[in-house]
Amino acid sequence: MASILEESGFNPGADLKIVGTNPIKHDGLDKVMGRAKFGADAFLPGMLVGKILRSPHAHANIKSIDTSKAEALPGVKSVITSADFPEKKAGTPPGDMTRNVMAREKALYDGHPVAAVAATSEKIAKQALKLIEVDYEVLPHVIDPVEAMKPDAPILHDYLRTKGVDGAEDKQTNVTERMVTQLGDADTGFEEADVIVERSYDSKPMHQGYIEPQGCIADYSEDGQIEVWCCTQAPFVYRDRLSAILDIDCNKINVQQSELGGGFGGKTGFYGEPLAIMLSKKASRAVKIVLSRIEVFRGTGPVSGTSYTIKMGCKKDGTITAASAEMIFQSGPYAGSMYFNAPNAMFTRYDLKNVDITAYEVLSNRQKVASFRAPCVPQIVFGVEGVVDEMARKIEMDPIDFRLKNACDDGHTTIYGDTWGPIGFIETLKQAKESDHYKTPVKEGEGRGISTGFWFNRGGETAASLNLAPDGTVTIATGTADVAGSRISISMMAAEELGIPVDQVRVKMVDTNSLGFNRVTAGSRTTFSVGMVIVDSARKCIAELRSRAAEMWDVPEDGVIFEDGMVRPASANVGDFEPMSIADICKKTTMSHGAISGHTEMNVTGAGPGFAVNIVDVKVDENTGRTDVTRYTVIQDVGKAIHPDQVVGQIQGGAIQGVGWALNEEYIYGDDGRLQNAGFLDYRMPVASDVPMVDTIMVEVPNPAHPFGLRGVGEVPVVPTMAAVGNAIGDAIGIRPTSLPMSPPKVLDIIEQAKAEGVYKG
Amino acid sequence: MDDVRYEAPESPDAASSLLAEAGGGGKVFAGGTDVMVQIHAELIDPGVIVDIKNVPGTQEISESDGAYTFGAATAGMVLMDHEGFSSTWPGVIDGVALIGSIQVKGRASVGGNVCNASPAADSTPAMIAAGAICNIVGPGGERTAPVEDIVTGPGKTSLADGEFIMSFSMPKRPAHSGDAYLRLTPRTEMDIAVVGAGVNITLDDDGTCTAARVSLGAVAPTPLLVADAAAALIGTKVDDAALTKMGEACSAACNPISDKRGTKEYRIKTAAVIGRRAAEIALERAREN
Amino acid sequence: MAKRSHITLSVNGDEYETLCEPDQSLVDVLRNELELTGTKEGCSTGDCGACSIRLDGDLVCSCLVLGVEAEGKEIETIEGMATSAEDLHPLQTKFLEINGLQCGICTPGILIAAKALLEKNPDPTETEIRFWLAGNLCRCTGYDKIIRSVQAAAEEMRKG
């Protein structure tokens, strides 16, 4: 059934008063005054401290766990192991989830939880962990995804068989799936090519690096009602999955999200929450678990490492004739890399006729993979855009012109079957070419890189309520997590629609008891999807306001219009009525039909695809291989920036995360399979002095499926970054790196190779 | 862990006695920026934490006839903000300035940096190059030792039970002297040296190098005093040939491991680069004095 | 079990008494004993700066200070930077206006650190701000708007 929103028609070109301005975000004051409550910032009476015992082995059978000494320690109120959780079949989604939060038969990575305690103090809880005796049988482990695919590799799960391969039914493996994606005929396409470039690439796991470690409180009441407070991108998903692994009805689990101190995909799945619930149940007290930074690195998911080959061919005029790829994606001990995004997104933005992609997801003895901005795409675009650049160089074509030559336009049908409406890729490329950065010659001794990226953007299940108070102010209840400022954008869209100042709107992220299911904040869906739902709710309120006014004036409903926050007679013929504000009507609702609210559930569709172009300058130290990024410009199609400063912030943040991934960030494992750099000292995220300002050019090609034309903006910024930095380094030193991160020792080796081959530029 | 005590003695003898009584279970606590991390990571489990900051002399900076003495627990920011000290020993300040963040340097001290005995400590090579002397207090009274004699291996020092460093004495500075410390790290800040080099040189009026000390960090189990690298400079005008030879001597002295912070080969290769660059900065400073 | 230590300390001008373990960090005391949670704990190793406070005026990471060391000391935390929305420090105002914060977890530490910078150097260059704040990790913003917020606040404060 069509919603009011759909029936009322969209007008992205409307004259907007609030959308497109930069009001101060409502959650900002508490954040600058130290009053915002994050995951670790809440306390309950009698609350216990929960701590987790983790496996020191990358792969080991758990022969037995003796918790008796820990239980006997004064102050310890509960101890749990996998035996306290319902048995779920291995290899199923709940089976994997329950085993990831608490190892059952085996410990499958360094840091895998094996037991947990709740005690009256942190000190006692830590002492109790030392008293738990775990008898491990250490097994050979495998972390490298290429090694994990070999026939003699240690096998993580006896039951696993590769999907998508004929005759694999009786073979033990670590490969979960083989996925083939094809379009046209790649062989023919390569035959038509004048130039073919084929390169192999690899990347290591990187972590989302949110500054707030996961923190939660669970309180299991005696009648089985569970209250969970936690920092999450996905309160409803947490609830449903907790229900699935704990065999507890959804309506007995109420998840309240705290402020979220960064997530970037890493807080879409739970870690401590189910443990806190079971500890609380056993102890009959609330239990708080806050991970340490070491636990965040050892126990939560980095992204997929990869190993892949990209082959592309083009004609002398620049037309790409074919593209193929073979890719391996490293997961943790369970599936969930979302590697299927890569085949659908890696080449998408170029109008290709012939494509042949094979992708594998491979399990390994490292932390379970978790989502990160545009999951599995940036590390592949690193290679794709390297090959694209090399083709352009070989035919001596400007890198932006080469991309323009192959760029998709409106109406393109993608490899995954969608046909696009208006898109802004060509416009971003044109603006890149016209930018001050691109027109400014590269500085002596530096290199410049160009790259491009695409992200689908998402919609999905979204529910919200918009309530008009008697004084005409507005409260909004949403269940889609605010991860960096969506509340202000939602307030602005509501205010725009209702014709009231944004300060009269407040958004609250409510608990899971208060609304229907909301999908996770991921895929750049939140401002888009909640915006759709809120505009729909606002329009429902407006319809009701008109109806109430008609009743008060005793005129037909179509004789009342709503304009600039006021109901007015549609014309002089209707009668001479004083226009009424929202407050004028709402203060009288007790005399009519009660309060006015709009409530909407939608499975939102129509997210417009997003595109970005990066221009990056770097300086590489010839003698040490160290790279400094000296200038960075992002050109991105944002559809319509609701709150431009927020959008710019998303773009800048994504770009700098990409710089970290490009230059230094990686999980480093020892020969024993243990993580060597579980801390901010050695997991090297960019610090303020490492990076330049990030210039942004926002292109606004409105998304016609959204009332204000917006496109998601969160993921696209990171997609082209490592490729752009890689291309810039290649330009600076003469050979383009193929391995992420492009850390100083690797780059120094390439410089020496370039010198030996006589291609060094410096 | 059960019985950890915190003590903040107010005299050298009291501090020494507490440490001596605790044997291996005593931990000297100055700025605490390493000790706190080790407690958090459960790498150490001290019986008694002996905070030496209340001991007179551990946080003072004094100068006598051009020769400086400073307390081992003096916070990095205090040293950096001391105009006289920082203009006399800019290379030591280079090293101090690289110890963690401003916040970390609000607490971290040279004494702690030296005694934590990390091969990659940033102030240690600079102090070795400077020819700094440790004033040590212990149950047997006071003694002195050059900084290069303190670190005996990763996390290990030559200090006996009950001993701690009270202060450091810097030599008087001849004219035309300059020192510098430079390190190689992937990031600009908040990192651990992959290679660190401290260089201290003195020129005569003609610009010929009459004295030099070169120390390397992060390329061996302990910070190194590299006599060959110094010898490559002494008697020269510190020209390109001398600097090249000096760099080669730096690489030759390396005995590194491969770890998460850098490979053995990379460290050896870049020791020459960083050593030479540090020498160039020291040279420039010496010429200015 | 060993007895806990009694400490008396001043936080933002208010005197507090509490008990703490001899090896308990000051950030833990502030957050979990005094329930002053404005100071955040991101790493416990001095690498992220989220726990930045002033200790007798010195800018420090409170995760690297023992609670017992705070005996008799004056501590300033984010909760003391403004007592109400009407008397915000110029840094707080500029961070709001320029959007120098996204998720907000690093913000208290960055504001404390930036305030210390501007007291010492009222007119810092971009490079000086970047190096001063190198000990404060932010993962959301890419630092651009943080640096601009500090620059704008400095300018405002110089105008007086």
Image (cartoon, coloured by chain):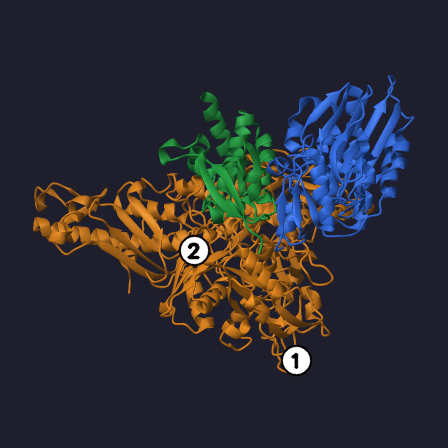
Chain colours: A orange, B blue, C green
Tag 2: Cα neighbours inside 10 Å, few (<14), some, or many (≥20)?
Answer: many
Instruction: Give the residue at mark 1.
Output: A171
Q: Give the amino acid type for the residue marked by disc 1 in the picture.
A: Lys
Residue drawn where x is 58% and y is 73% of the image: A104
- Residue A57 percent across, percent down from the top left: 67, 66
- Residue B219 percent across, percent down from the top left: 80, 45
Q: How many marks?
A: 2
Residue in the foreground of this view, choosing between B212 and A650: B212
Between discs 2 and 1, the one toward the N terminus = 1
Residue drawn where x is 75% and y is 37% of the image: B165
Q: Is residue B288 left or right of residue A96?
A: right
Q: Quadrant of residue B252?
A: top right
Q: Is residue A5 left or right of residue A404?
A: left
Q: Is residue A174 left or right of residue A47?
A: right
- The quarter of the rendered structure image containing the N terminus of chain A is bottom left
Residue drawn where x is 69% and y is 67% of the image: A142
Instruction: Give the residue at mark 2.
Output: A525
Q: Give the amino acid type for the residue marked by disc 2 in the picture.
A: Arg
**Element assignment for label 1:** loop
Q: Is residue A35 visible?
A: yes
Q: Is residue C92 above or below residue C66?
A: above
Query: Are discs 2 and 1 both within one chain?
Result: yes
Chain identity of mark 2: A
Q: CA distance from mark 2 to mark 1?
A: 40 Å
Q: Is residue A699 visible?
A: no
- Residue A578 percent across, percent down from the top left: 11, 40
Chain identity of mark 1: A
